[in-house]
Image (cartoon, rainbow, N blue to C red):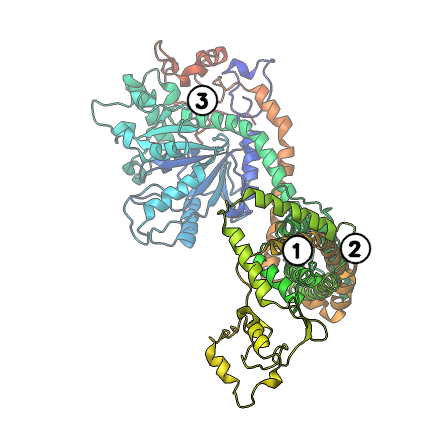
Amino acid sequence: MEDEHVSGNSPSSTSPSQPTVGPVGSSVIPIVNKLQDIFAQLGNASTIDLPQVAVVGSQSSGKSSVLEALVGRDFLPRGSDICTRRPLVLQLVHFPARPDPPAGESNEWGEFLHLPGLRFYDFSDIRREIQAETDREAGGNKGVSDKQIRLKIFSPKVLNITLVDLPGITKVPVGDQPKDIESRIRTMILSYIKHGTCIILAVSPANADLSNSDALQMARVADPDGSRTIGVITKLDIMDKGTDARNFLLGNVIPLKLGYIGVINRSQQDINFNRSIKDALANEEIFFRQQPVYHGLSHCCGIPQLAKKLNQILIKHIKTVLPGLKSRINSQLVSVAKEHAAYGDVVDSKAGQGVKLLNILTKYCEAFTSMIEGKNNELSTTELSGGARIYYIFQSIFVKCLEDVDPCSDITDEDIRMAIQNATGPKSALFVPDVPFEVLVRRQIGRLLDPSLQCAKFIYDELMKMSHHCLANELHRYPILKKYMDEIIGNFLREGLEPAETMITHLIEMEMDYINTSHPKFIGGSNAVEIAQQQVNASRLAVSVPKVEGLDNGKLQTSEKLSKSSIKKFGANGIVHDQTAGVRPLADSDRPGSTGASGSNWGFSTIFGVSESRSAAKPSSSNRPYSVPSHDVDHSLSMIQLPEPPIVLKPSEIHSEQEILEISITRLLLKSYYDIVRKNVEDTVPKAIMHFLVNHIKRELHNVCIRKLYRENLFEEMLREPDDVAARRKKIRETLRVLQQAYRTLDELPLEAETVEKAYSFDTDSTGLPRVPGLSSSFYSMPNGYNTPQTASLKNPKFRRSAQSGEQPSPLFPNSDTTVDA
């Protein structure tokens, strides 16, 4: 590569067929770093997951040493207890070396996002700033916080990599740490590594059992198949004698698709004696060369290989997720822009406030009308809404309820029989009277009033719900205006409900006041009699009771004799028609209603024959001696005493055939006319509700709102926003700005990403990674029999030619004799 190749040392540097490009990742990784800086402005509110590498490990597992080795400088807080107490987002940016940097500056520096424009050329100052910023947020007594620290390091000695150093997993709380410190740290780590865009760098010490590694355990939770986890095994130099990590590095213990890298950390003694990173890297190379067990594993040994692997994997990962990332940012940009437009701008002038209020009222009334008519833009596909609910109430609730009602269900045969007998008065009717039918049918028609009024109330409730749903998002910004509108619209709806209920009441009363038996669909009397007769005959045949012989004839003869002997035929002028004596005038004692010697009236004394014998012996009552008292006759006969009539009189329980027929006729007439009235009510009640309530609201709502709300003295009060809405608008505006900036940044990516993809083969060793001068290149050759997924890159011809051409001097060391092309 142009920036990292040494002239003359590699054929690829002078070959005309090789494209001239920057170091690996010079296009895509800086763009992602820029996106991370952009979204960092939103803090935890950002919902966009960007590609990054998260460093996970237990406390004192060597995470900080690995990061410092990748940078080549000491800059992280160190100690024997917990050091990383806030997530540190570390962006390594390859920056070409300047031949003559200005005085007081160097080719390596750091920048903090919370201190924009300030460069730290002294890496000890970077360490102090990290410690101070950690203490400001998490306290000075071992507290932990999930708020990020973002550090960007520019150097010609690094590859473009973005890492997140997370707090180490600890077991026992110390200092100001809460009792649940372990679960809190695990939750914080999972919040990073659970996303598919995150590469997990699981750091585990070699002097501990790998199967008990906290880092690998956490990685397996977030990445069960191990497709985005890189294992880093530290402290290989302090393993027990006779043990090694070869099986770990080859993935024979816990397989990972991205493999393992073994590294040597600086010991605490090295740190105390200020041993440089350069010396530590040289010592690492010597260690792996002197250990025969690691020969042939150069692809997975050493910090330089870790840097190369991270760079390559991160580039591949970024290119994989970028299309989806761009789509998510675009989708979120559209959503946030729509929400920002809904919030609008703040208006201070009276004229502007008046225009805004008028627009809100007009838009509200249009939305209300559209919702009723089913023309609103946001039609629901999950439930009925708006006018469809009104139609459902009319047809599926009101009409269906009336259809299911049987008009005769609450009227018994005894009720009809009682009404008929009460209507006949003191005589028996020759035909079925009209009065019982009219009384009963009016009572049934009156039952239609309650469901009709209830239907109007249901429609009123639906209109109230619609008024609350209309423009809900926009009116949420103005709670005072919404309160005024709810009050005015509620009163207006109640004013429309009153005439609707009055009209419904009049409709039912009209039906009750005039029973139109001439209606063409009414069954009529003759048809009812015919149908009722057929029903009675059918029921008589269906239920036939056998009769006892002689019983009915005996009863009939007895009744005939009784009627002949006890009933005399009276003329109009008081003449008795007698077969033996002919026609004679009635005596006073024989006249109905007179008080004779027997004390009986209505001619019932003739049942016993007393009147006939008395007439023969004494033709005239005037011939009787005056001295004979009349009560002597009473003693000679048994006196008949009538029972007192009860307070409540009811006919006998036995129905005659005539009564059964009359009841059946009345039921037919009642049901026929009720059906006519029910259909009229089903048609006229919805019309009354629509006219007096629904359509009245549609016609007059806008005028009412303007008349009662468009007042200049109320503009400022009604358009006043609560503090949370103003804060939300500000936040939405900031989010929109960030998303727009991110979208513009991604627009720079496609051409450069295509160039990177065509210009580089990740199977080559042309990255110019550091190697210790003087080491034989045989260390980097692979013996047969050790082919692993991580060794595929070594089979590339370009790699072999580069490896055979000689050692490439390291660009990582500031005192190196190597010159890096700009």
Q: Can I make out residue 742 in this image? A: no
- Residue contact between numbered discs 2 and 1, judged by CB atoms under 8 Å: no
Q: Residue furthest top?
A: 784
Q: Residue furthest left?
A: 241
Q: Which residue is mark 2?
A: 518
Against 269, residue 260 (above or below) is: above
Q: Nearer the viewer, residue 177 or 719?
A: 719
Q: Nearer the viewer, residue 190 or 383?
A: 383
- Residue contact between numbered discs 1 and 3, judged by CB atoms under 8 Å: no
Q: Quadrant of the N terminus?
A: top right
Q: CA distance from mark 2 to mark 1?
A: 16 Å
What crowding class fits label 2: few (fewer than 14 Cα within 10 Å), some (14-19), or many (20 or more)? few
- Numbered badge on residue 16: none
Q: Element under label 1?
A: helix
- Sequence-wise, which precedes: disc 2 or disc 1? 2
Q: CA distance from mark 3 to mark 2?
A: 117 Å
Against 577, residue 89 (above or below) is: above
What crowding class fits label 1: few (fewer than 14 Cα within 10 Å), some (14-19), or many (20 or more)? many
Against 612, residue 496 (above or below) is: above
Q: Element under label 3?
A: loop
Q: Which residue is mark 1?
A: 666
**Which residue is rendered at x = 45% and y = 22% of the image?**
809
What crowding class fits label 3: few (fewer than 14 Cα within 10 Å), some (14-19), or many (20 or more)? many
- Sequence-wise, which precedes: disc 3 or disc 2? 2
Instruction: List x then y, in percent, for residue 450.
Output: 63, 61
Instruction: List x then y, in percent, for residue 21.
Output: 59, 23
Q: Which amino acid, by three-letter code, is at mark 3?
A: Pro
Q: Which amino acid, by three-letter code, is at mark 2?
A: Ser
Quarter location, residue 409: bottom right
Q: Which residue is mark 3?
A: 809
Against 113, residue 628 (above or below) is: below
